[in-house]
Amino acid sequence: MDGVKIIDTALAFRLNRSNNDKLAAGIPEEDRACYEELMAKGVAAKKHPKDEVVLVLAATPWEYFGPNDNGDALFSAPFAKISEKGTLPVTQHSFMTKAIASRNHKYHNPEEDAIGEILSANYNEKYKRLEVLIRYDWEKATKECLKIAGNKCLLVSMGYRIYAPDLPSESGEFCSVCGHHNRVPSDRCEHLSSMVGSVVDGVPVYMMNGIGYFVDISSVAIPGDFNARTILRG
């Protein structure tokens, strides 16, 4: 057990679009210059003419969108037993220091498993979402590059480590009902073991994810939530 759980974003609305140009058209005019500058930096990082650069919506906070379909919740600010160190504005930086761009959560051997490069990660306070800029390598991620080049949205999923020797003892997840703390599934309380998604005494049962770090952002065929996908193509 390596202490990694798969966390996909859960928005309160659906994009219902498959064309990246349409997604780009949905960006408000006042934000276009900022996104255009970001994407220009991404394009400049290409190492092969057929490399593809995309900005993906990677995660959203519980305070605005609730837990995802799997019962996982991430936070933008301290809440209950979630400290500031476990919030998205802090953990976002681990995408640059700990994570790789991979396929189907194969990330244990970064030199072999990486299919691209994570160029930036930023928690967008205005839109309440974590955005990750990725360069997909043409030779290692040919099918991803072809899909993106065909104006199809790339679906993604994140791996988040909540237990490891380099993490503090307060890392892990907490039960939204009883507050029980665990770092591995075998130590979960009865609520998180068998009642996720239900309501107990008026309180929804979900996993409050605290201190930890992202280990990968993967291209997948079927994500836990279909909103974890491409926002822009460079």
Image: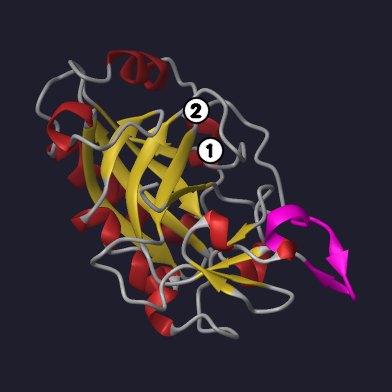
The answer to whether residue 191 of the structure is visible from this angle is yes
Percent from the top left, x then y, of residue 191? 74, 64
**In this orientation, does residue 37 appear?**
no
Give the quadrant of residue 52.
top left
- Contact between labelled residues 1 and 2, with CB atoms less than 8 Å apart: yes
Residue for point 68% across, 60% down = 192
Q: Nearer the viewer, residue 88 or 184?
A: 184
Pick the residue in front: 60 or 222. Answer: 222
58 on left or right of 166? right
Query: On the image, numbered disc 1 is attached to which residue?
Result: 23
Query: Disc 2 and disc 1: Cα gap in Å?
Result: 9 Å
Position of the C terminus by quadrant: top left
Q: Residues within 10 Å of mark 2 (few under 14, many from 20)?
A: many
Among all residues in the image, which is located at the extreme left? Answer: 47
Q: Residue at x 37, y 79 (%)?
A: 85
Relative to 157, 121 lies left or right? left
- The reply to whether the magenta stretch includes residue 126 is no
| Position of residue 208 measured from the top left corner of the image (x, y, whole percent) | 59, 69
Give me the residue at 84% from left, 58% from top.
198
The residue that mark 2 highlights is 153
Magenta range is: 192-204
Q: Amino acid at mark 1?
A: Leu
The disc, 2 or 1, on the residue closer to the chain's N-terminal end is 1
User: Which of the pair 206/222 is nearer the observer?
Assistant: 206
Q: Is residue 203 magenta?
A: yes
Labels 2, 1: front one: 2
